[in-house]
Amino acid sequence: MYSNKDDQLLTIKSNDWLYEYLCNLQKTDEYKQLHFDYFTEEHFNQKTHHLSSSVDMSVFHLNIRSLNANHRALCQYLQILSFKFEIIILSEIWSYNIEFYGNILPGYTFHYVLPSSSSVGGIGMYIKSKYAQVVLNDYVFCSSINCQHENLWIEIANGEIKYIIGGMYRYPNGLVSEFCNNFERTLHKMSQRNIPCIIAGDLNINLLKCNSDRHTDEYFKNLLIHGFFACDCYAYTHHLTQCNAN
């Protein structure tokens, strides 16, 4: 759900056919147990107040469109949520004054990759400082003029808990085929290790084309081939009157 200017809650219908497509593709009952929905902050707090002790790893992702411009709103929003995430991944952090925002979330360590050819783009990751953290530079796949993106990979550990966390931002209008080929090589590297991996970000891939575009279909199948559980949201994440079909 989301609020319009009159503060009325409007229900946005999810894509049932996309849900069925993903269920058939993954052929596992676990996917059917996943729940995607739109929540107000109050409703989210009600749903998650009992989960803190039972969740092994929690990840929050947001396309922030400039951390410099929106860091206060981010901090205020996270303060409203009673559930405290272990990992906070931000896409499109932009490069403006980025060095000033390493300490805005007490108890977290800030990692980031900035865009190389402009001020717009980038990926950032706040990780709770209780984890040992190792940046995995050998997992990074390079951007090109035909497919621009930033990606960041960090291995975290705390006692018996160990994860690889990936954050990605892919610019609109780039070649999905090139992105899939490059991403597949990183997926292959990760699948060789017996460590759980969580990937979050804004890939600007139109999932509604999954049954008509072979590159979008390839994106899903690459995840499954390498043992990943494709938990892509089947509900709308944008509400626009016009949307690029990329």
Image (cartoon, rainbow, N blue to C red):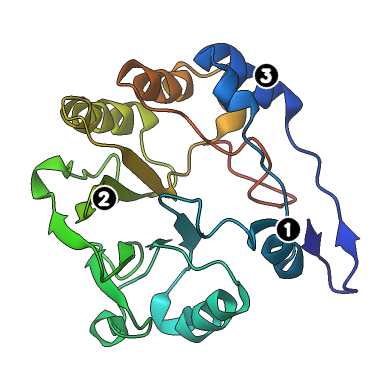
What numbered label is drawn on residue 151? 2
**Cβ–Cβ under 8 Å for marks 1 and 2:** no
Q: CA distance from mark 2 to mark 3?
A: 30 Å
Q: Residue at x 15, y 41 (%)?
A: 139
Q: Residue at x 39, y 19 (%)?
A: 224
Q: CA distance from mark 1 to mark 2?
A: 28 Å
Q: Residue at x 35, y 83 (%)?
A: 106
Side of 106 relative to 29 (left or right): left
Q: Which residue is mark 1?
A: 39
Category of crowding for the residue at label 2, using alpha-carbon neighbours closer than 10 angstroms: few (below 14), some (14–19), many (at least 20): many
> Which element type, helix, strand or loop, lies under badge 3?
helix
Residue in front for this viewpoint, 50 or 34: 50
> Which element type, helix, strand or loop, lies under badge 2?
strand
| Label 1 vs 3, first from the N-terminus | 3
Q: Residue at x 47, y 25 (%)?
A: 216
Residue 14 in percent (x, y) is at 75, 37
Q: Amino acid at mark 1?
A: Phe
| Label 2 vs 3, first from the N-terminus | 3
Q: Amino acid at mark 2?
A: Asn
